[in-house]
Image (spheres, rainbow, N blue to C red):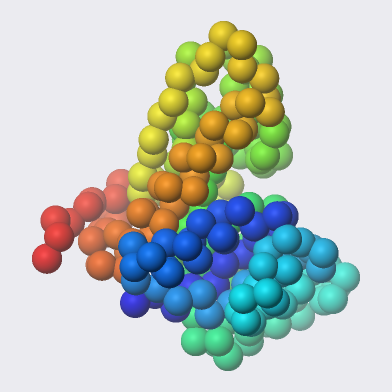
Amino acid sequence: MLHLAVFASGRGSNLESIARAISSGNLDAEIALVLSNNSTSGALAFARENGIPGIHLSGKTNPDPLDFSSRMKSELKYHDVDFIALAGYMKKVPPDIVNIYTNRITNIHPALLPAFGGKGMYGINVHKAVLESGARITGVTVHIVTNDYDVGPIVAQECIPVLDDDTPESLAERVLEIEHRLYPAALQLFARDRITVNGLRTIHQPPA
């Protein structure tokens, strides 16, 4: 079973999808901690409403980068976290945290990496870039987090067509539906020890 910390900055819809998957028995995990850089985020509100430990940690609470990282490490250790799921977290995870949790931090990205990734490529910005590029296919990527933006080993992807009448908003809505299904399924692969990392590739082991 995964002892998850979910990092989120916004409304927390992927956090909710993870919680639903746990409740329904489709994800062998417990959410040990919700961490947000936004004190008014929907993610923290969801944590409070559901009795999940939640903390606000940001440049406002801990302006010094070393102190910020130290506080994050302390919270993760205190809550016995062994896996981190980034779910709309708009800040870069400190390098020492990434190193401690090597291959145990995942992120969900609203495009088919390596296309439309990198710094500044998040949320509606991604969908605008997809439409402006003329791409006919987009989708969702779950990947392992490294110290560089959006370049870690890919765990899972699913694609959808870009429709002729799509707007950034309509595309975002359809992509989000996939996110809510794909992310818990990808996390379950880790919960069942079915992911092996080999360089930039992940190998999916068959079910035991």
Q: Please provide percent x and percent y for residue 183.
A: 44, 52
In the rendered view, does 5 fall on the left or right side of 42?
Answer: left
Q: Please provide percent x and percent y for residue 42.
A: 73, 61
| Res. 5 image quadrant | bottom right
Q: Is residue 74 above or below residue 97?
A: below
In the rendered view, does 172 fall on the left or right side of 60?
Answer: left
| Residue that extends furthest to the bottom in the rendered view of this protein | 78
| Res. 119 image quadrant | top right
Q: Is residue 200 visible?
A: no
Count the numbered circles shown. Answer: 0
Q: Is residue 156 above or below residue 186?
A: above
Q: Is residue 189 visible?
A: yes
User: Quick one: quadrant of the N terminus?
Assistant: bottom left
Q: Is residue 125 above or below residue 44?
A: above
In the rendered view, does 136 fall on the left or right side of 205?
Answer: right
User: Quick one: quadrant of the C terminus?
Assistant: bottom left
| Res. 117 image quadrant | top right
Q: Is 185 in front, or is 123? A: 185
Q: Please provide percent x and percent y for residue 150.
A: 53, 44
- Residue drawn where x is 47% and y is 31% of the image: 139
- Residue drawn where x is 61% and y is 17% of the image: 166
Q: Is 118 in front, or is 156? A: 156
- Residue drawn where x is 50% and y is 66% of the image: 19
Q: Please provide percent x and percent y for residue 176.
A: 55, 40
